[in-house]
Amino acid sequence: MKLFLLTWFFSLLYKIASKPVLDQCEQIKKYTHVLFVTAHADDIETIAGGTASLFVKCGSIVNYVITTNGDKGWSKDYTMTSEELATIRESEALSAAAVIGVTNVTFLRQEDGRLEGVDPIELKKNITIAVRLFQPDLVISFSPELDYATYAFGLMHSDHQRTGLTTLNTLWPAARDYLSFTDLYEDGIMPWIHQRCGSLLLRLQTTFQCHR
């Protein structure tokens, strides 16, 4: 059963990947500004590098936010210090982004592996700044759900979980509401104005008008 599911999954990926780029662009061209919020310097390339590259190729403006400095990442050199490793990781992230065509990378430089100890309001504020400045119409980050299966593939990390949860909490409602972090508004960093449109929004318009 597992073999069947894996075969089906990879065949589906192949069908999607084998579509002409122009066909794929037709589906995603509505996303003109895309923001990736990740925890470590290599997260995007490891997990979503192809996706980021496709958005750029289809004309989207793509920005990255990386919450930690990667100073605890694995290194074969046991003489390496955390400060040296953080500098290397940041340089690697910029180089990898340039290959894809991303020119704007924001580093929040929190200590690797310690994100759960960071003031959650401070982290939310820093992500809010990035969202408000860039005004994305699509934000991609980690799922905050704790899933053991992702551990088996080496994709789950406490920093990933905290980054994903804080990003969700930022998008709703901190980035949108000017009364969240009023100092940002006073400094001219305007609220996130992206709005979802569709039949549900139209049906709920009357109820929204009840709130002033």
Image (cartoon, grey):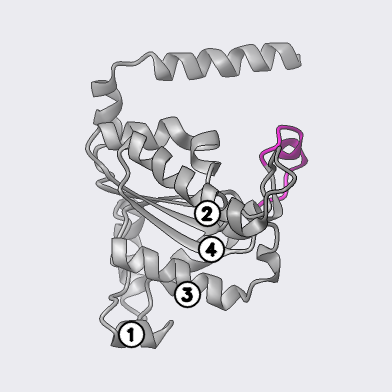
- Amino acid carrying label 4: it is Arg
For the C terminus, the quadrant is: bottom left
The alpha-carbon separation of the residues under discs 1 and 4 comes to: 39 Å
Nearest-to-viewer mark from 3 and 4: 4
The alpha-carbon separation of the residues under discs 1 and 3 comes to: 25 Å
| 56 inside magenta stretch | no
- Amino acid carrying label 1: it is Arg
Q: Nearer the viewer, residue 29 or 63?
A: 63
Earlier sequence position, callout 1 versus callout 4: 4
- Amino acid carrying label 3: it is Lys
Nearest-to-viewer mark from 1 and 2: 2
Q: Which of 100 and 197 is in front in this view?
A: 100
- Amino acid carrying label 2: it is Thr
Nearest-to-viewer mark from 1 and 4: 4
Residue 163 is situated, as x and y percent measured from the top left of the image, at 58, 58
Mark 2 = which residue?
87
Residue 204 is situated, as x and y percent measured from the top left of the image, at 35, 64
Looking at the image, which residue sits at the far front?
79
Residue 60 is situated, as x and y percent measured from the top left of the image, at 26, 42
Near mark 1 (Cα within 10 A), the count class, few <14, some 14-19 or many ≥20, is few
The alpha-carbon separation of the residues under discs 1 and 2 comes to: 48 Å
Q: Which residue occupies 63% across, 55% down?
A: 71
The alpha-carbon separation of the residues under discs 3 and 4 comes to: 14 Å
Nearest-to-viewer mark from 1 and 3: 3
Near mark 3 (Cα within 10 A), the count class, few <14, some 14-19 or many ≥20, is some
- Badge number at residue 109: 4
Q: Quadrant of residue 50?
A: top left
Q: Is residue 206 left or right of residue 175?
A: left
